Image: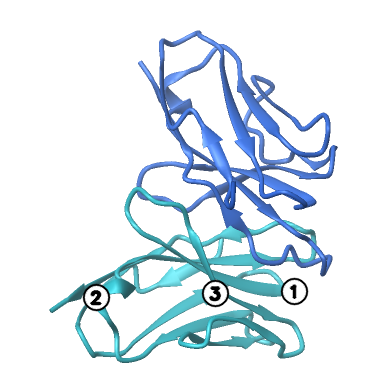
Chain colours: A cyan, B blue
């Protein structure tokens, strides 16, 4: 049931864009996105709910295709502070999150 | 405090010892979650409380793992007779859980890193 993320890792130069994908084999109620820096706690980025509602930070955008059970996180004009490992979390309507395999993002100057 | 607090931050145990990990969630947060994170992996769900009720413990790997939240605030994760495979970071998260069945934004603590020798 663990969501699969792609790519597993990506290296960007500052200012470049990236897309991180998350696929589930099971119907989703919502998708969450978190970023975790090395040795730190995961930090909330966004929730995408079934039906199109989104809650999150202004500088982050994402999409949720309910039919395909997929979500994508869009990082534009990347900054050094965007570095970290990104996790999607799938909610199947049972009040818990199942986190994905992770995508490690490295931003270089 | 303003965030989720976990203690100890680091724990080294000899195989066979019992350990207790504490989580102090954000005041007023109804839901509390425990996750286990192995090196280089995503957090894996262990158990979930709503107030003092443990509603889901399906992720606990064995009967050596036990969690409680007796007064609906502070929670303790106890691991009995620790094994080397228990070595991991144990993350606690809390949420307001106002929009069930979605869990809402999870606020994570910095975790307790357990090393079993």
Residue B68 in picture, x, y percent from top left: 75, 29
Say left or right for A51 vs A18.
right
Number of the front mark, 1 or 2: 2
Residue marked by disc 1: A29
Q: Give the answer, above or below, for where A8 lies relative to B54.
A: below
- Chain containing mark 1: A
Residue closest to the eye, A2 or B71:
B71
Q: Earlier in the sequence, mark 2 or mark 3?
A: 3
According to the picture, the residue beneath numbered tag 2 turns out to be A80
What residue does disc 3 label?
Answer: A23
Q: Secondary structure at mark 1?
A: loop
Q: Residue at x 45, y 26 (%)?
A: B85
Depth order, front residue of A77/B40: A77
**Rendered residue at 44%/11% (across/down):** B15
Q: Position of residue B79 (x, y in %)?
A: 59, 21
Q: Name the chain letter of the residue that bears numbered label 3.
A: A
Residue at the location (48% across, 41% down)? Answer: B111
Q: Residue furthest left?
A: A109
Judge whether B16 appears above or below B44 on screen: above
**Residue shown at 82% from the left, 69% from the top:** B99
The answer, for residue A1, to whether it is visible in the render is: no
Question: Do residues under tags 2 and 3 come within 8 Å of each other at their CB atoms?
Answer: no
Of marks 1 and 2, which one's residue comes earlier in the chain?
Answer: 1
């Amino acid at each position: 049931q663990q969501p699969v993320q792609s790519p597993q890792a990506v290296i960007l130069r500052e200012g470049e864009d990236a897309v991180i994908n998350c696929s589930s084999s099971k119907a989703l109620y919502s998708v969450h996105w978190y970023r975790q820096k090395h040795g730190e706690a995961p930090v909330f980025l966004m929730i995408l709910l079934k039906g199109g509602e989104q809650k999150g930070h202004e500088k982050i955008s994402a999409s949720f295709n309910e039919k395909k059970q997929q979500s994508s996180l869009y990082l534009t004009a990347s900054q050094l502070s965007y570095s970290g490992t990104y996790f999607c979390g799938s909610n199947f309507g049972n009040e818990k999150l199942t986190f994905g395999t992770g995508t490690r993002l490295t931003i270089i100057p | 405090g303003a965030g989720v607090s976990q203690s100890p931050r680091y724990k080294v145990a000899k195989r066979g010892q019992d350990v207790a990990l504490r989580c102090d969630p954000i005041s007023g947060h109804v839901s509390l979650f425990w996750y286990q994170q192995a090196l280089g992996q995503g957090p894996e769900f262990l158990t979930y409380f709503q107030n003092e009720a443990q509603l889901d413990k399906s992720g606990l790997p064995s009967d050596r793992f036990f969690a409680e939240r007796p007064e609906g605030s502070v929670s303790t994760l106890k691991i009995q007779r620790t094994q080397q495979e228990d070595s991991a970071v144990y993350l606690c998260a809390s949420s307001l859980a106002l929009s069930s069945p979605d869990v809402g934004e999870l606020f994570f603590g910095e975790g307790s890193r357990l090393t079993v020798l």
